[in-house]
Image (cartoon, helix red, strand yellow):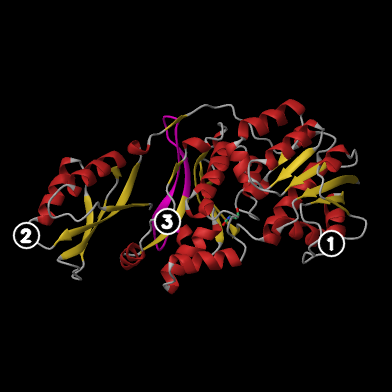
Amino acid sequence: MAKVGVAIVGFGVIGTGVVEILQKNRELIRNRTGVEIDLKTIVDIDIMTPRRVKPSPDVHFTTDYKEVIADPEVDIVVELVGGTGFALNLVEESLRAGKNVVTANKALLAEKSEAVFGLRNKVGKVIGFEASVAGGIPIIRTVTNALAADNIKAICGIVNGTTNYILTKMSEENWDFQTALKKAQELGFAEADPTLDIGGFDAAHKIAILGALAFNCPIPYDKVYVEGIDKVNLCDIKYAGEMGYVLKLLGIARIDDSDQVEFRVHPTLLPNKHQLAAVRNEFNAVLIDSRYLGTSLYYGRGAGSLPTATAVLADIISVGRSLDNPERSVKYNSFNNYAIKPMGEIESRYYLRFNVADQVGVLSKISGIFAEYNISISSVVQHEMKIENNVPLILTTHLAKEKNITSALDRIEKLDFSNGRGIMIRIME
Ligand code: HSE
């Protein structure tokens, strides 16, 4: 029986979930895995406010994390504070003190990867981070263990529950953006700073981590192309819906045949029949395309107390099992250095909406410009609804290069019948 001493730092949404599952399933974990989890200490700046679970009296509460660093009986420090300030200090001090670390902190891993993993490699301890991507879905283990013998070519995922919840409510219930965001905050999915969700940065943290694990390259957070859902118009959700598409915020990591990698996060239209189109509300899903397995899909709850706590506990158990030999634990190995494909070079299908005067020759001028840039039109819809003599003209394209689409939009914007720049949303088949 491996006995593992644990300290939780940050007793919030996830920390309470960890304690709750531990209280209910300690025996099951012991019998199933041979790991005896001994929760020794909980650290938080607020240890007075009662939480929805009450740890047993032998758990020590403190506001001073240094007690944990100094405690020789703590094998694992579970960092559930979030952010990249204090959390980085805590992780570094823990590793230096010879502790293993379990964390749900995607911002820390993505933004401070060199510091965190560099130190981990130096001290030879383990960092478990299953809970950092897609909450309770065991996606880190899938990429690093289950698919360890396969070549991953692409990962596309709905990896942010808050934005998926907002887009679902806007599309299905006609909720406005702010109402949907407020509800997501009440339900506890949103980050403390919800601009991380809305702006696409949380999804960028996660796809940077997943893609790096898949391609064994450095975590390229600062090179991820990021567009959030803050500029999404309800009318585009509706128009695209009429055409058989649903709007999702996707994280995409892909490697092409010449070993160029794409890392991007942006609103994406998916045909209703696409596997990810059916992922609604706060649910997450990750679609992996790998050489030998082919397409595989992983679906579940990407946020919330108990789902995320299952991932934290799985990491604690995994560290417990590998205490005698850390080499057996899940590793992040960055040994490739691929070039990142510039966004102008990516190829996609596109949904384009122009606000144009309802007059002779508009369509022919637009299609002439498209032809100059080698853009093939797939469909055209003009709605009769006029606002001050302007009408929405919606086109979808076949596969085109992004730089050609941007150049065509630049040209069309300058024409006298255009009222503002065309809206562009990428379509994935
Ligand atoms: N804010 C995140 C989300 C929480 O909405 O998915 C889980 O990382």
Q: Which residue is mark 2?
A: 360
Q: Are marks 2 and 1 in contact (CB under 8 Å)?
A: no
Q: Amino acid at mark 2?
A: Val
Image spot of residue 4 (x, y percent): 87, 45
Neighbours of disc 1 within 10 Å: few (<14), some (14-19), many (20+): some
Q: Quadrant of residue 103?
A: top right
Closer to the camera: disc 3 or disc 2?
Answer: 3
Q: Are marks 3 and 2 in contact (CB under 8 Å)?
A: no
Q: Are marks 3 and 1 in contact (CB under 8 Å)?
A: no
Residue 143 seen in render? no
Q: Amino acid at mark 1?
A: Gln
Image spot of residue 210 (x, y percent): 57, 42
| Residue at 89%, 40% in the rendered image | 71
Q: Going from the N terminus, do you reach mark 2 or mark 1 first?
A: 1
Neighbours of disc 2 within 10 Å: few (<14), some (14-19), many (20+): few
| Residue at 45%, 63% in the rendered image | 167
Q: Going from the N terminus, do you reach mark 3 or mark 2 first?
A: 3
Q: Which residue is mark 3?
A: 230
315 to the left or right of 341: right
Q: Is residue 271 magenta?
A: yes
| Label 2 secondary element | loop
Image spot of residue 339 (x, y percent): 45, 28
Vertical side of 106 occupied by 339: above or below: above
Q: Magenta part mainly helix, strand or loop?
A: strand
Q: Give the CA separation, mark 3 to mark 2.
A: 34 Å
Q: Going from the N terminus, do you reach mark 3 or mark 1 first?
A: 1
69 to the left or right of 86: right
86 to the left or right of 326: left
Image quadrant, ligand 1: bottom right
Image spot of residue 344 (x, y percent): 33, 37
User: What's drawn in magenta, residue-wise?
Assistant: 251-274
Q: Amino acid at mark 3?
A: Asp
